[in-house]
Amino acid sequence: MTPEQFLKNLETEIKISKLSPYTIRNYLEFNKQLFKHSGKQPEELDGQDIKNFLADKMNDRASSSTIVFLASIKFAYSSLLGKDPTAGIKRPKSEKKIPQVLTKEEVVKLIESSSTTKSRLILQLLYSSGLRVSELVNLKKQDLDFNENIGWVRSGKGKKDRMFILSKKLSSKLKKYSEKHSDWSYIFSEKKPLTTRNIQKIVQKGAKKTGINKDVHPHTLRHSFATHLLDAGTDLRKIQTLLGHSSIATTQIYTHISSEQMKSIKNPLDEL
């Protein structure tokens, strides 16, 4: 089997497994890079070739990238050749990085930087709902209930549906916008979803325009949504449900960055 045939068959396996477009892209690209680096046919490749690739190409990458790389090779070889050349390779520990969060003032600046109604609505929706960017671009009019100020993510991460909340003032704006574009299949696009790259550009352009000196991306608004809810005293379990986290442990990272809760702690010296 040639590398080209292998990659074509791999794409078929990934689609059958109903993995996300993001996963398809990563899995195909990592396998393609590995073949190019080793110069071998798929059946000839072994664990040492994978280790050589990790040492040459992944040494300065984050642990999460290495984990995804190894997962892509394992999936490909297990599915197509019935073996796992990554079996003897030690996985790095996941880095427990605290996500960066915008202040409420920075969120306002970012939203106000929008030059179009569409961009402003996208930024407001990301922040007011905590949606992942892939969930936002796939939203359809029937997924939103403007009377109840809620919406539904259909087949989100883990292929699960979940409810999210809408700001009342945003809900009315989205209703008017969707009525104006009643022939569109999606809330923000006509026939096919916007690319996630489109949304990234909107967020990054706004951050640059307002001079926010942080690494801002769409997920930053999701982190900010969760942290500001926690600051306001919202129960962590409710935040877990809104974000669609399968484990409360994932949501607990926001307890480390909630400045308001940290400020509320009584200093022991003041109690003497």
Image: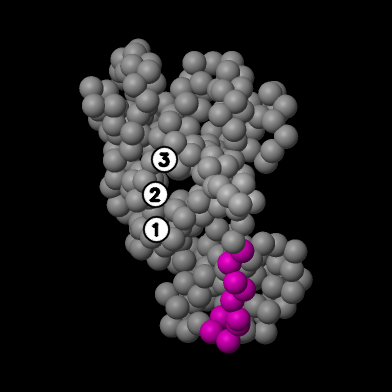
Secondary structure at numbered mark 1: helix
Residue annotated with mark 3: 233
Secondary structure at numbered mark 2: helix
Task: Say left or right for 161 vs 58.
Answer: left
- Residue range (magenta): 85-95
Name the N-terminal-most of marks 1 and 3. 3
Q: Amino acid at mark 3?
A: Gly
Residue 6, x across and y down, in percent = 51, 70
Residue 196, x across and y down, in percent = 52, 39
Q: Amino acid at mark 2?
A: Leu
Residue annotated with mark 1: 248
Residue annotated with mark 2: 236
Q: Are dots 1 and 2 in contact, CB under 8 Å?
A: yes
Q: Predominant secondary structure in magenta?
A: loop
Numbered disc total: 3
Q: Residue furthest front?
A: 272
